[in-house]
Amino acid sequence: MGFLTVLTYILLSFLVGIFLITLPSGIVLLPNYLRHDAFSGLPFSSRISLILTGFVVILLCLRYVQKMVSGSRKNKSISFESKEGEVNITLVAIEDMLKKMLESRDEVSHTKVKVGLKKKMIEVKIKGYLNYQVNLVDFTRDIQEKVKEKLQVLLGQDKKVQVNLQIRKIAVSEENSQDTEQDPEIPFRNYE
């Protein structure tokens, strides 16, 4: 989900929670056509239920925010123990290394690499443009194998790596398109 979507959900949850808390108490100013004392005639248990529901909505929203913040901090680096001590490798460093590896290939350009941690697995998402018309099955398999091999050499064979590749655009070289679009030569055109 995008940042604005999450922010909208959080704000709406807070507003709904506050509305449910303040509605039975009469603090919320409703328009005249809704103010016919419908909420003042509610039994005490119904008012308490509305207030508790409002608190639950706000607490769930706060829990979600806390989980988002703690999850983003926790998944910023990969840690493992060696004989000499603890080693931490940031995900940004791995992303930069993979991006340089992919940029050295002529077949791809405009690459974006995202590395994430899931339960007992490293997930690599690669997006990019393909510069040449190549066999996609062989090319993507080759890229996925090389990325996986590079990460397993760097982090050790015990780490499970999943590589997802997304080709966003296939750019046809201009030489090929100009050859096919040229007008045919007219016979005896330059004859005097």
Image (cartoon, rainbow, N blue to C red):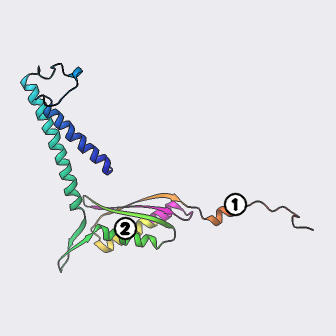
Please name the amino acid that badge 1 sits on: Thr
Please name the amino acid that badge 2 sits on: Lys
Circle 2 packing at 10 Å, graded few (<14), some (14-19), many (20+), is many
Q: Which residue is mark 1?
A: 180
Q: Which residue is mark 2?
A: 148
- Residue 86 lies, with reference to residue 47, above or below; the image says below
In the orientation shown, which residue stands out farthest toward the left? 44
Q: Helix, strand, or loop for circle 1? A: helix
Point out residue 117 in the picture as x, y percentages from the top left corner.
Answer: 27, 61
State which quadrant residue 181 falls in: bottom right
Q: Residue at x 33, y 50 (%)?
A: 2
| Span highlighted in magenta in the image | 121-141
- Residue 100 lies, with reference to residue 65, above or below; the image says below
| Residue 90 horizontal side relative to residue 50, left or right | right
Point out residue 60 in the picture as x, y percentages from the top left corner.
Answer: 17, 43
The disc, 2 or 1, on the residue closer to the chain's N-terminal end is 2
Q: Residue at x 51, y 63 (%)?
A: 130
Q: Residue at x 25, y 61 (%)?
A: 120
The stretch drawn in magenta includes residue 126? yes
